[in-house]
Amino acid sequence: MKTERNWRVIMLDNDEKQAFNEALLKLMLLIYRIDHKITLAEQDKFDEIKRRMDWQSTINIESYITHASGLVSQYVNEKRPLDLLKAIREDLNYDPKLAIGMAQAMMDIDQSRHEDEEEIMSYLTTKLTIAA
C-alpha cells in the first residue's frame, strides 16, 4: 500500500511538473511576442529553454509549441495577455521563482522593456506564490 501511495505522489509530481513546463513555454512565447517583434536573441533564448526542459509529455514538444503559439498569438492579438497569465497561473506556481527568473531573463534579452512586458512582470511578481 505504501509503495502504491508513493508511486501516486511521483506521478502527481510529474504531472504537475509537465503542466509547469507547458505553462512556462506559453509564458516565454507571450513575452517574446508581446511587442510584435521577435529578435534572434529572443528566439535563441527560447530555444535554449526548450532544449533544457525535462519534457514528459507524449506530445512532441515541437507540436506542443506550434499549438501554444497559436493560442498565445490569439491572446496577444486580442490584447488580453493578463487573461493568458490568469489561465496558466496555477501551473506556474509549481516553481514560481523559476517562472519569474525565466521571464526576467527573456525580457532582458533585447535590452528594452515594452510596457506590456512590465505589466506581465508586475502580474507575475504579485500573483505567483513564492514560499519563504
Image: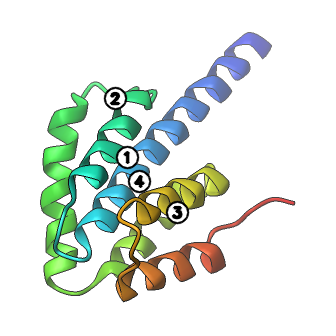
Give the x, y percent position of residue 117. Answer: 40, 78
The CA span between labels 1 and 2 is 9 Å
Judge depth for marks 4 and 3 and give the one in front.
3
Choose between 11 and 47: the one closer to the eye: 47
Q: Which residue is mark 4?
A: 23
The CA span between labels 4 and 2 is 13 Å
Which image quarter holds the C terminus? bottom right
The CA span between labels 3 and 2 is 26 Å
The CA span between labels 3 and 1 is 18 Å
- Please identify the residue farthest to the front as the structure is shown: 111
Q: Which residue is mark 1?
A: 22
- Marking on residue 2: none
Q: Secondary structure at mark 2?
A: loop
Against 33, residue 4 (above or below) is above
Identify the residue at image location x=15%, y=68%.
73
Q: Earlier in the sequence, mark 4 or mark 2?
A: 4
Choose between 38 and 54: the one closer to the eye: 38
Choose between 84 and 121: the one closer to the eye: 121
* Lateral position of residue 17 relative to residue 25, left or right: right
- Marking on residue 57: 2
Q: Earlier in the sequence, mark 1 or mark 2?
A: 1
Against 122, residue 27 (above or below) is above
Q: Quadrant of residue 58?
A: top left
Q: Which residue is mark 3?
A: 104
Q: Quadrant of residue 32?
A: bottom left
Identify the residue at image location x=41%, y=53%.
23
Amino acid type at image mark 4: Ala
Q: Earlier in the sequence, mark 4 or mark 3?
A: 4
* Lateral position of residue 3 relative to residue 110, left or right: right
Judge depth for marks 4 and 2 and give the one in front.
4
Labels 1 & 4 near each other (Cβ < 8 A) = yes
